């Protein structure tokens, strides 16, 4: 059976809100990263990120890491890549892909500033700066984000121990 528009039924389809990150500072997590080689020979890393706070809003960035026709383009991309790796806590930002696998970026958490960008007469949202998650929210705790129960249990255990550690000898 082939697809036809006349049989399309949208009765049970919900209209979603804009899922692109709005202008401003955000803490994001890399959910997907893949290498793409363009017909021109340019190589870029396509990175999809979701906002940590609500998990619904996303943004994508295309980081050019090699461009034989426009070396300055690659220079900017490599600088952005290194900022992302450093702020995301990658264990080796100077040699991040020894196995030629950019998907190791998945799970990195960092801050971004998103602003408007105009290209070919169209305005869109674009990452303007990569930064530390702490620069976006000074109280941000990556461990608590990854394991909310573990952080509170560890904290409660430490508080209980302190409360029981008094001068009564038993």
Image (tube, rainbow, N blue to C red):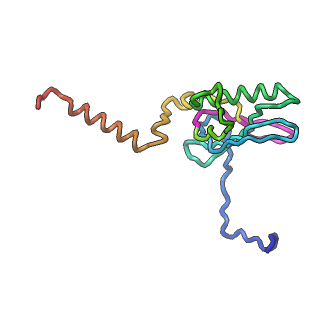
Q: Is residue 117 magenta?
A: yes
Is residue 160 positioned above or below 78 on the image? below
Closer to us: 1 or 5: 1
Closer to us: 77 or 17: 77
> How many numbered callouts?
0
Quarter of the image for residue 39 reads top right
Q: Position of residue 110 (x, y in %)?
A: 59, 33
Closer to us: 48 or 137: 48
Q: Is residue 38 left or right of residue 15?
A: right
Magenta-colored span: 108-126
Is residue 131 positioned above or below 35 on the image? above
Closer to us: 89 or 136: 89
Q: Position of residue 32 (x, y in %)?
A: 65, 44
Q: Position of residue 73 (x, y in %)?
A: 81, 28
Quarter of the image for residue 49 reads top right
Q: Given the current orientation, which residue lies at the most extreme front position? A: 99
Residue at screen point 32% across, 38% down? 156
Q: Is residue 167 magenta?
A: no
Residue at screen point 85% across, 36% down? 41
Q: Please identify the quadrant where the C terminus is shown.
A: top left
Q: Please identify the quadrant where the N terminus is shown.
A: bottom right
Q: Is residue 60 left or right of residue 52?
A: right
Q: Is residue 155 left or right of residue 135?
A: left
Residue at screen point 57% across, 27% down? 135
Q: Is the stretch drawn in magenta largely helix, strand or loop?
A: strand
Residue at screen point 25% across, 34% down? 161
Quarter of the image for residue 67 reads top right
Q: Position of residue 58 (x, y in %)?
A: 65, 45
């Amino acid at each position: 059976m082939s697809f036809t528009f006349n049989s399309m039924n949208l009765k049970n389809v919900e209209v979603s809100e804009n899922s692109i990150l709005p202008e401003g500072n955000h803490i994001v997590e890399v959910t997907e990263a893949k290498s793409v080689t363009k017909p021109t020979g340019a190589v870029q890393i396509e990175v999809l990120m979701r906002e940590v706070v609500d998990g619904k809003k996303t943004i994508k960035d295309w980081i050019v890491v090699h461009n034989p026709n426009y070396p300055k383009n690659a220079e900017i991309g490599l600088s952005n890549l290194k900022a992302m790796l450093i702020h995301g806590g990658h264990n080796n930002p100077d040699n991040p892909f020894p196995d030629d696998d950019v998907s190791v970026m998945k799970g990195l958490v960092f801050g971004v500033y998103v602003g408007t960008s105009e290209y070919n007469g169209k305005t869109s949202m674009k990452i303007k700066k990569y930064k530390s998650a702490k620069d976006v929210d000074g109280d941000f705790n990556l461990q608590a984000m990854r394991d909310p129960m573990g952080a509170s249990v560890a904290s409660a255990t430490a508080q209980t121990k302190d409360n029981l550690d008094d001068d009564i000898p038993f």
